[in-house]
Image: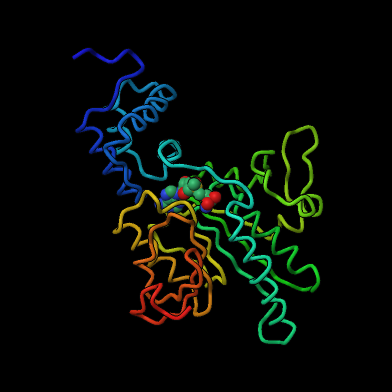
Amino acid sequence: MTAARPGHELVTDAQLKRYAKLIYDVAGVEISPQKKQLLSNRVRRRLKVTGIANFEDYYKKLVSLPVTDDEWDHFLQEVTTHETYLFRDDSNWNWFRSEYLPQLVSEARQGKRQKSLRVWSAACSTGDEACTIACCAAEGFASQAGWDVKVIGTDIGVGAVREATAAKFNERSMRLVPDALKKRYFDDVKGEPFWTPKPPVRKTMSFRQHNLLDPLRERPFDVVFLKNVLIYFNTESKTRVIENIKRVMSPGSMLVLGAAEGVSELLSGYERIRPWLHRYTNSAGSPSGKAGV
Ligand SMILES: C[S@@+](CC[C@H](N)C(=O)[O-])C[C@H]1O[C@@H](n2cnc3c(N)ncnc32)[C@H](O)[C@@H]1O
């Protein structure tokens, strides 16, 4: 067997197993044996930056550090996917803008609800989803003064949260933002190739670090967006996440899922409205998809 060229070495099968267990225990993300090349490439990048000699020593370094250490954050950023952009999955946003928000406005007009909206963008990456929510809410409530909107974005990555807080979006992230909304709710950052939400939109958003495997200490939300994160989780870690999400939902609140979250079997207590949209009913033992639509 020929040795790999320097800089192209792969983790051994035993190392892959150990790294995979470590990542699973900390973030709930599964690394399959097919990801050997990918994991090796990503860890190699950290070896280069840290000057640590090999995969074995880097593993030892990680286990010696608290998961709050910066190196853990860099490592997790390397091994998780961060792809995101504004107005991703237009069916979600058509529902949110054309059905959900108008319904809230109408209920508030009839005195059936407070003028308040709380939304959680769970696993928000760089905040594009949270910014989409905030921008749609600004548009949806433009005809009625006095709405209190709070959009909370969380992610396991401290670096991602930092970027989300900076709220600078490049042309690629902005490509699906409807022109009218771009003009009304975003400023072109002077001298930089970025757009940023205008202050009234921006002030409705806040971000913080949070691991979905842990409960979030927050009052219940009206809507939770949980998209494009559980794809790499297994049933055990998905179940833990779904239980944590339930703690911050109250009857009638909505859960918006990504197309491949793979949790429909785990959604007891939810009414399936669309494959990606579920209303929390708190009716224990009624698996999603079997309750009335
Ligand atoms: C592909 S992005 C999804 C962004 C956004 N929700 C969207 O759909 O456009 C996935 C994000 O999940 C985060 N993530 C992975 N495991 C996590 C965990 N255990 N807790 C919180 N966030 C996690 C990653 O850091 C990454 O930013």
Question: Which colour scheme appears in the figure?
Answer: rainbow
| Nearer-the-camera pick, 214 or 168 | 168
Q: Position of residue 274 (x, y in %)?
A: 50, 68
Residue depicted at 67% across the width and 42% down the height: 169
Residue 158 visible here:
yes
Q: Position of residue 93 (x, y in %)?
A: 63, 60
- Res. 12 image quadrant: top left
On the picture, is 223 further left or further right than 245? right
How many callouts does the rendering have? 0
Residue found at the very far bottom of the displayed protein: 111
Q: Position of residue 102 (x, y in %)?
A: 70, 73
Q: Quadrant of the N terminus?
A: top left
User: Above or below — where is 173 with respect to 155?
Assistant: above
On the picture, is 3 further left or further right than 289? left
Residue depicted at 49% across the width and 80% down the height: 251
Q: Position of residue 282 (x, y in %)?
A: 42, 80
Residue 156 visible here:
no
| Nearer-the-camera pick, 62 or 124 | 124
Residue depicted at 29% across the width and 43% down the height: 22
Residue depicted at 79% across the width and 46% down the height: 187
User: Above or below — where is 185 with respect to 275?
Assistant: above
